[in-house]
Image: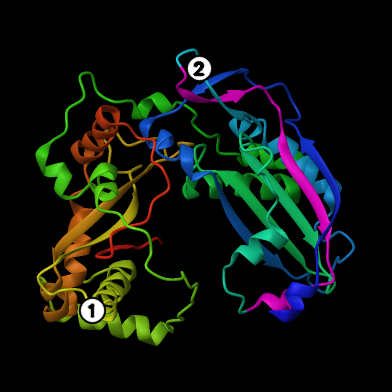
Amino acid sequence: MGVVDQQEVEVVESCMVKPSEETPSHGLWLSQLDLKMVNRGHTPNVYFYSPDSGDVDNFFDVARLKAAMAKALVPFYPLAGRLGADGDGRPEIDCAGQGVLFVVARSDLTVDGFVDFQPSPELRRLFVPRVEDSPSIMCAIQVTFMGCGGVALGTALHHVAIDAVSAVHFFQTWSGFCRDGDAAAAVLELPCHDRTLLCARSPPVVHPDALTVFSCPKLSLAVSAEPSGAVVNKIFVLSKDQVAALKRACTSGGDGGRVSTFCAVSAQVWRSFCTAGRLPTDATTRLTFPANIRGALRPPLPARYFGNGIIVLGAACKVRDIESEELGSVAHRISGAVRRMDDELVRSAIDYLEIHGSKQPPSSMPETELRVVS
């Protein structure tokens, strides 16, 4: 950590990469699932790469990266836009080809120095492009060439524009154009930008059963409290054998059926959370997690729907149940919430946000609630 503190990253270039062709110019309507992310700002990610022994000279060639980005921004043109508002003040993406912030930097740091590095504000400061002065920008990229020959690729994507599924689609497309040039267009899967597919019903209707599974923002915020102590980032590594053991343990509870890795690990984490937090046994604890709605709607959303297609689901029960039940029973509480996600639940969630408002201020969770993100 001391080495990192003494070394800095030098920015050598900063520019805007714009779509290589003319793109639609309009205000892109945002769904309630997008609007709830307005105050989330930019999601930071850092990826480290080391060159192969082959073509080292062309490893992360900046000119090629920019040209590929410009091509990718033609079908993914909202990422070249800016967060704006319509005539009524409702947030929208102003699509006018303003461009993606592209930063090139260099540093004497090495990739090996970050193998076990904990997520931290310092990591973001070093390798993620700064967007504080341009909060309306949708996408920013920083390519940092490191002393060892490796590269740190930092990204900052505004969550109002896309979720993780859509982000992967965009980066796969950028990668394809970078690798194959114009030939990548032949296999390009075009994104769907019609966000009215997730508009609220008229009039909006919330099914009562949906509120037992959908994690309602207003209900969570009402009991939120600031953390009582310092927040610590910590990584716990589970081996393949440990995950397999957890999944085997889950077959002894619930309905005895198989559970996913997510449900098995989340069940163990939930139990440990209740025990380590010394929560009152008669308190109600809740585990919440984001779920992809794309396949739950009828008809389903297009596979390449581009935007936020996520709602937060939850499972709740008494702390005593989490601590006393078989691990499989806890896992099946979680999987049960997933199974209940259908068209009506998703539509009710959207209608709830339409009625109560979707913009959320940053907040912490109650001490009895655990959020798991996969």
| Rendered image quadrant of residue 207 | top left
**Is residue 102 placed above or below 269 in the rendered structure?**
above
Q: Are marks 1 and 2 in contact (CB under 8 Å)?
A: no
Residue sitting nearer the eye, 365 or 123: 365
Question: Please, what is the three-letter code of the amino acid marked with disc 2?
Answer: Asp
- On screen, 350 above or below 237? above
Return the x and y of residue 60 as percentages of the image width and height. 80, 57
Q: Give the alpha-carbon distance from disc 1 to disc 2, as whole Å.
A: 48 Å
Residue 146, position in %: x, y? Answer: 81, 68
Give the class, few, some or many, for how many residues have Cα within 10 Å of label 2's Cα (few <14, many ≥20).
few
Q: Is residue 324 left or right of residue 335?
A: left
For residue 306, side relative to residue 144 (left or right): left
The x, y position of residue 229, in whole percent, is 41, 71
Q: Residue at x 74, y 48 (%)?
A: 178
Q: Is residue 111 magenta?
A: yes
| SS under mark 2 | loop
Q: Is residue 17 magenta?
A: no
Q: Secondary structure at mark 1?
A: loop
Vertical side of 369 occupied by 52: above or below: below
Q: Which residue is mark 2?
A: 86
- Residue 32's spot in the image, x, y percent? 36, 32
Q: Position of 145 compared to 127: left or right? A: right
Q: Tell me, for residue 278, which label it has, or none.
A: 1
* Residue type (three-letter) at the residue carrying disc 1: Arg
Q: Residue furthest top?
A: 87
Q: Is residue 86 visible?
A: yes
In which quadrant will I find the N terminus?
bottom right
**Going from the N terminus, do you reach mark 1 or mark 2 first?**
2
Magenta residues? 89-115
- Foreground mark, 1 or 2, reads 1
Residue at 17% x, 60% y: name it. 316
Residue 256 visible at all: no
